[in-house]
Image (cartoon, rainbow, N blue to C red):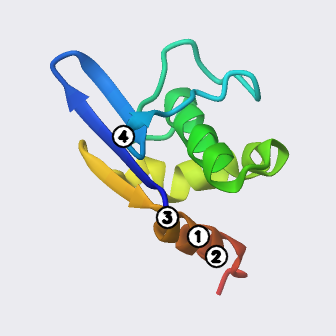
C-alpha cells in the first residue's frame, strides 16, 4: 500500500509517495506551470489529482478522465498537511462511481 503526503514547508509545497517526490504528470497533461496545490478547485489542484491518480492507478488515460471529479471530491478538501493511502484513494473512486441519490 502506498502512502501519499503533502505539506506546506518553509521551502514551499512538498508532495511525496512513500517518501519520494511525486511526479507531476506533466507528460500526461499540463493543467498549470505552477506545480501542485490543494484546498481549492483549479489548475494546480487538478495537477495534483492527476499525479495522484496516475501513480495510484498506473493508467494515464483513466487518471486524466477522473482528475477533475477527484480534484473536486478529494484534493479541494485536503488540509494544509495531509496523508492519503491507497485505500483512501480507492474509497474516493468508489464514491465517485456511485450514482447520485
Residue ID at (46%, 49%): 75
User: 89 and 37: which one is in front?
Assistant: 89
- Closest to the camera, between mark 2 and mark 3, is 3
Residue at mark 4 to residue at mark 3: CA–CA distance:
13 Å
Pointer 2 or 3: first along the chain: 3
Numbered label attached to residue 90? 1
- Closest to the camera, between mark 2 and mark 4, is 4
**Label 2's element?**
helix
Residue at numbered disc 3: 1
Callout 4: few (<14), some (14-19), or many (20+) C-alpha neighbours within 10 Å?
few
**Residue 66, how many percent across, how many down?**
72, 53
Q: Are marks 1 and 2 in contact (CB under 8 Å)?
A: yes
User: 16 and 35: which one is in front?
Assistant: 16
Task: Say left or right for 84 vs 92.
Answer: left
Residue at numbered disc 4: 19
Residue ID at (76%, 42%): 64
Numbered label attached to residue 94? 2
Amino acid at each position: 500500500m502506498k502512502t501519499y503526503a503533502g505539506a506546506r514547508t518553509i521551502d514551499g509545497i512538498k508532495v511525496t509517495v512513500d517518501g519520494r517526490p511525486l511526479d507531476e504528470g506533466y507528460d500526461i497533461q499540463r493543467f498549470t506551470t505552477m506545480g501542485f496545490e490543494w484546498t481549492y478547485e483549479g489548475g494546480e489542484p487538478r495537477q495534483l489529482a492527476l499525479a495522484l491518480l496516475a501513480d495510484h492507478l498506473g493508467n494515464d488515460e483513466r487518471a486524466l478522465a477522473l482528475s477533475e471529479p477527484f480534484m473536486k471530491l478529494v484534493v479541494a478538501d485536503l488540509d494544509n498537511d495531509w496523508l492519503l493511502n491507497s485505500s483512501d484513494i480507492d474509497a474516493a473512486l468508489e464514491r465517485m462511481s456511485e450514482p447520485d441519490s
